[in-house]
Each structure stands twice: as C-alpha cells, then as structure tokens.
Amino acid sequence: MLVEVRVQLKKEVLDPQGEAIRRVLTGLGFAEVSRVRVGKLMLLEVEGGDAESVRARVEAAARDLLSNPVIEDFEVRVP
Amino acid sequence: MSAARRPRVAVVVFPGSNCDRDAMAAVEVAGGEAVPVWHASHDLGGCAAVILPGGFSYGDYLRAGAMAAHSPVMQAVRHHAADGGTVLGICNGFQILLEVGLLPGAMLMNRSLRFICRDVFLRVERTDVPMLGQLRKEKVLRLPIAHKEGNWFADPEVVDWLENQGAVALRYCDGDGHSGEGANPNGALNDVAGLVNAAGNVLGMMPHPERRVGSLLGGSDGLAIIRGLVEVA
C-alpha cells in the first residue's frame, strides 16, 4: 500500500524558506497569503495488508530516520 | 607521545565526503598518522582518535548527516566515544554528530538561505578539553566556514541547560572577540560554532580547522585544534 509521510518543521522553529516564499508571493500579488511553511512529503510503497501494523512500522521509520525530532514533526497517512 | 610511532588518527570517508584528504593532510602536519576508514567499516582501525570530516555525505539527502548517522562506521564511532575515545566532527561531521545524538540539537538552513563560504571569527570558550587544550581561553580564531546548514537549533530549555554545562566550546564573534548579531554568519542560537559533550571527548564544530594548518593555506589558526587531537591519540 502507498503510505504518506509528511514531515514539517515544528511550529516554534523558524522557517526562513517559507518566509522567503511568502515575500515573493506578496510581490506577485498574492498578498492574502500570510504564512508559508515548507515541509517534505514522502511516499512509501509498503508490502503488507494490515493497515495498523504498516502504520506502526512506518511511524518507527519516521522516528528513526525520516524526521529529526529536535526540529520536525511527522504525520503518517495510511490509506 | 612516542618518537618512534606517530599517533594514529582515523579519518572517516563517507560517500560524498570532500574534506577527508584535507583532514588527513592536517593530521600529518600536526605530527600524526592519518588512517582513512571507509564508512562501511565496523571498526576504526585501532585508532584512539577519529575525525568525521566535512563534505556532503550521501549527498545531504533527507537532512545533512541523516543518512551517514546510520552507516556501519557510526556504530564504531558511538562505541569509541562511549569508551572515552576522542571524536572531532567538522562541518558535515558536526551535523552527523548531531544526527547520531552524540551532541545535542539540530542544524537548520542558514538564516540567509545561502551557502556561506568565507572566513569567520570564533572565540574559544573551553580550554579544559583535550582538543582545545593548546589554546588560550577567549582566544579569537579566524577559520573558514563552508555550509548551508549551520544554523544550530535546540529547544530553549536545552539551550539553557547546555550553557550551564559549558557545552558551547566555540562561539562566533567579531575580530575583537565580541559576539553579536553581525558576527553570527548563519543564525545559530547563542552564536554556537562548536559544542563539546559533558565528558569533553567529543567536539563538533562548523568552521574548518583542517583548512588552516600553515601559511600556504592562509594561516594556522586551526593547527592547535588538530594538534590537540593528535596528542591525545
């Protein structure tokens, strides 16, 4: 099954990349965009049919490698 | 140090390391014997000190240092550090030490979002650890940096705790030794340029001491650190 892992900088961590994008958007006329946060989306093709155990395994992978808990939060989405 | 046998220092080579040869040359200048150790190795060749050099290990994929942190050699580096062995992480090597948890915090992208390659000044805050033992406290070093992810970050309570422990071994400053907004190249919290662990045997730093070990390289401000490492090996 195809599992999504979304990794985002924690709320309290400054995201200069997102801020730079927001400034350019404002310059382009998208002034209504008040905040941009940049994250990563990873799509994992995982063998196995049991959604619950797949989720547990992917969460472990996200903790071990896919995210850095000091600066990032993650979210796992199983179909 | 025995006159007959030079101290052996392991220099880990990851796919994508690009300061490994510089680090090896610096070890030789400092009187040691540099031993290259491939990332797939499970030991450090019996060396008493190890350098994790700068570069872009595994292409900096995912996060700088994240993939290297899980390579086989890092298990050996972990055991080495736990046994009191000396570990110096430079630039990407520092990023790897953070990812592997041997030093606290994490690196964010530079505040300017740019790769910065220039000289900076840094102040020596600790001289009671072997790798910095040949320096005078408050001494100002001029060393090059070359990185895009050097904006050190940790939770505020972790930062306070580290400051109380004296873990900030090297701090960005101006040429007169004063810290301040203009002297911090990348936005690192508390002007952190280098951290040392509680036992004093693991040092990580963003500036490159191995690139300043002689007048041909523009100065020798980095030599005392490499020599400090070699002499405990």
Image (cartoon, coloured by chain):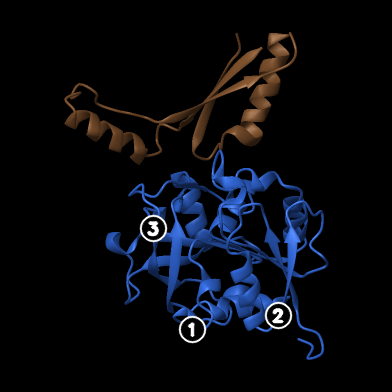
Chain colours: A brown, B blue
Of B12 and B227, the residue lying toward us: B12
Mark 3 vs mark 1, CA separation in Å: 22 Å
The N terminus of chain B lies in which quarter of the figure? bottom right
Q: Is residue B170 left or right of residue B83?
A: left
Q: Position of residue B108 (x, y in %)?
A: 45, 45
Q: Residue furthest bottom?
A: B3
User: In the picture, residue B120 is in which quadrant?
Assistant: bottom left
- The mark found on residue B216 in the picture is 1
Q: Is residue A7 above or below residue B83?
A: above
The C terminus of chain B lies in which quarter of the figure? bottom right
Mark 2 vs mark 3, CA separation in Å: 30 Å
SS type, badge 1: helix
Residue B129 visible (yes or no): no
- The mark found on residue B116 in the picture is 3
The residue located at (73%, 15%) in the rendering is A53
Amino acid at the residue labelled 1:
Leu
Amino acid at the residue labelled 3:
Ile
For the residues bearing labels 2 and 1, Cβ distance under 8 angstroms: no
Disc 2 target residue:
B32
Amino acid at the residue labelled 2:
Gly
The residue located at (75%, 79%) in the rendering is B7
Q: Position of residue A12 (x, y in %)?
A: 40, 36
Which chain's residue wears label 1?
B
The mark that comes first in sequence, 2 or 1, is: 2
The lab-note entry on whether marks 3 and 1 share a chain reads yes
The lab-note entry on whether marks 2 and 1 share a chain reads yes
SS type, badge 3: strand
